[in-house]
Image (spheres, rainbow, N blue to C red):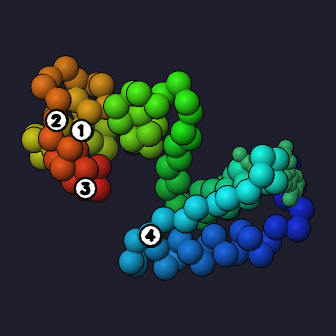
Amino acid sequence: MELIGRDKDVGSIRDFFEAAGVRGGALLLVGDAGLGKTAVLDEFAAMEAKNGTRVLRAAGVQFEADVNYSALNQLLFPLGDDMDSLSDAHRTALRCALGFEIGPPPDRLVVSNAAVL
Ligand SMILES: Nc1ncnc2c1ncn2[C@@H]1O[C@H](COP(=O)(O)OP(=O)(O)O)[C@@H](O)[C@H]1O
Ligand SMILES: [Mg+2]
């Protein structure tokens, strides 16, 4: 699909990500349904992926609202074996949080750090 008339919006998102790569951050796109929020994000993600950036995405859906770490699961699932490089404690915590391994509920701070590592 060709995105019409949204170069400025895609450029703004690129500027945000360039700065966020240094200082972190979060960007919230707000608008009525059908306004093109997903289309702009799709365009930006496709361009970045073409340039070699690893793009991880998750979508919030109501039926997963009560599922622990469901968004993290969506984000990290494509990384597969990359978790092997984590320390045992971080790998186990992350695999338990994501449901790949059975174990006691992991400490949230450990899961958080494992995800960043
Ligand atoms: N700028 C645009 N150029 C071309 N198609 C667009 C544009 N903005 C939205 N669309 C199309 O309109 C529909 C709704 O857009 P979508 O991104 O799903 O809206 P939102 O996520 O804001 O609800 C989609 O089919 C999308 O491809
Ligand atoms: Mg949408």
Which residue does the numbered mark 4 point to in the structure image? 25
Q: Is residue 61 left or right of residue 112?
A: right
Which residue does the numbered mark 1 point to in the structure image? 94
Q: 11 or 62: nearer the eye?
A: 62
Which residue does the numbered mark 3 point to in the structure image? 117
Dots 2, 1 in contact, CB < 8 A: yes
If you read the primary sequence from the N terminus, does the residue marked by circle 3 or circle 2 appear first? 2
The amino acid sitting under disc 3 is Leu
Q: Mark 1, residues whose alpha carbon is within 10 Å: few (<14), some, or many (≥20)?
A: many
The answer to whether one can see residue 70 in this image is yes
If you read the primary sequence from the N terminus, does the residue marked by circle 4 or circle 1 appear first? 4
Q: Nearer the viewer, mark 4 or mark 1?
A: 4
Q: Secondary structure at mark 1?
A: helix
Q: Secondary structure at mark 2?
A: loop
Q: Mark 2, residues whose alpha carbon is within 10 Å: few (<14), some, or many (≥20)?
A: some
The answer to whether 65 is drawn above or below residue 4 in the figure is above
If you read the primary sequence from the N terminus, does the residue marked by circle 1 or circle 3 appear first? 1
The amino acid sitting under disc 4 is Gly
Q: Mark 4, residues whose alpha carbon is within 10 Å: few (<14), some, or many (≥20)?
A: few
Q: Determine the residue located farthest toward the top in the rendered image.
A: 102
Which residue does the numbered mark 2 point to in the structure image? 106
Residue 106, given in percent of the width and then of the height, sits at 16, 35
